[in-house]
Image (cartoon, rainbow, N blue to C red):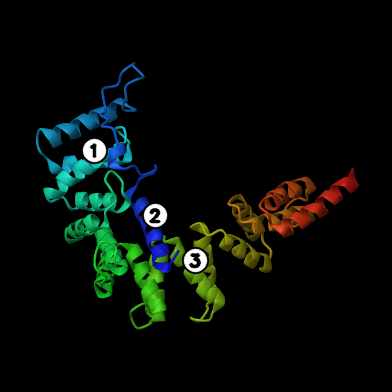
Amino acid sequence: MGAISTFRAVFLWALFDLLGCNSTPKAISQEKPVEAVEPTENPSKPVANEKNHYIRYLTLKDKCEEQKLQKSCYNLGVHYLKGDIVLQNYRKAALLFDQSCKAGIAKACGQLADMYALGIGAKQNTYKSAPLHKKACDGGEMKNCFSLGYSYLLGDGAKVNVSKAHSLFITACDNGFTKACVKMGDIYFHGLDVEKDIHKGVSLYEIGCEKGIGDSCTTLAELHISGKEIESHPNLKMKYISKSCDLGYFKHCILKGDILSRNERSPKNDNELVRLYKKSCEYDEYEGCLKLGRLYKEGIIVVQSLHQAAYILQKGCNGKHNDSCKELSEVQFLLHQGD
């Protein structure tokens, strides 16, 4: 797969996440019209989970169909999309978003654009999604300015226009859409169709990290670890390693534990070290299993337990982590000796 294809695939998965769908996309032709009905004892009929959901549904339906309040049509579309107070129906969601978008509801244009981009509730068509992203962006929806920027950057639904893409990313970033800041950080840091500016790239990564974008924290941590492109600061390195770990990059949990293991011993540091190795092991970073298993094997920090060590190391070995398998063999030998 080429770089652009990979880039597009990553973007589409991110877009699917932003859309808030948790189930497999379905084409419009696969959808059967489904309506929420009043709670009933008949299990063959679809029902809202709770009575207040049904009341909420009726209220929105009345405001949309009878009072022609397009914001209510949009909200009803969101519920059909998510399948929370009504049974999920992408087709109805798309129709309601289309109706609301034509009436000037920018969020509805944005939702419909995402559905066309992903092929949810309608046949995938990026040439339909791009103009809808523009309508939403013009209406102040920064997420869609970001998506439109990608359309221009990749030539997906629009003619390639790098300067427009950058302009849209900057607009979205300046107006609080953090992922756009991170994207511009990549562009400046690597000099992608702009003059390379590492300082500006790092500043944008810092914005992303402070707003909870894990990839930004991971990038900053790696930059401070290597010290090649920026001057490494120990305090900043530890800060970004910690945030990267907290946001799901569990290799950095192991690294933070390693750093703590070299520091002066204290109950607080010891407990944190064990927690970090345990966390990384639980999330299948098997180096963490190895290091936690060794602590139990040697009785360092924790109460010595060969059985606990074997249990932990077994997980690492099951994950084909060779060093865990070797350590497990040693622990099993010690256990047999004790029998």
Q: CA distance from mark 2 to mark 3?
A: 20 Å
Residue ID at (32%, 67%): 154
User: In terms of secondary structure, where does tag 1 sit?
Assistant: helix
Residue 123 spot, x, y in % from top left? 28, 47
Q: Specify the label residue 135 is tagged with.
A: none
The residue furthest left is 67
Q: Which residue is mark 2?
A: 13
Question: Considering the image in quadrants, where does the C terminus appear?
Answer: top right
Q: Which residue is mark 1?
A: 92
Which is nearer the N-term, disc 2 or disc 3?
Answer: 2
The residue furthest bottom is 195
Which is nearer the N-term, disc 2 or disc 1?
Answer: 2
User: In terms of secondary structure, where does tag 2 sit?
Assistant: helix
Above or below for 237 versus 21 = below
In the image, what residue type sits under mark 3?
Answer: Thr
User: In the image shown, does 32 or 66 lie closer to the viewer?
Assistant: 32
Decide: few, some or many residues near mark 2? Use Cα within 10 Å; few <14, some 14-19, many ≥20.
few
Above or below for 163 versus 10 = below
User: In terms of secondary structure, where does tag 3 sit?
Assistant: helix
Residue 286 spot, x, y in % from top left? 65, 56
Q: Which residue is mark 3?
A: 218
Residue ID at (13%, 34%): 65
Which is nearer the N-term, disc 3 or disc 1?
Answer: 1
Residue 115 spot, x, y in % from top left? 28, 49
In the image, what residue type sits under mark 1?
Answer: Lys
Q: CA distance from mark 3 to mark 1?
A: 40 Å
User: In the image shown, does 192 or 229 lie closer to the viewer?
Assistant: 192
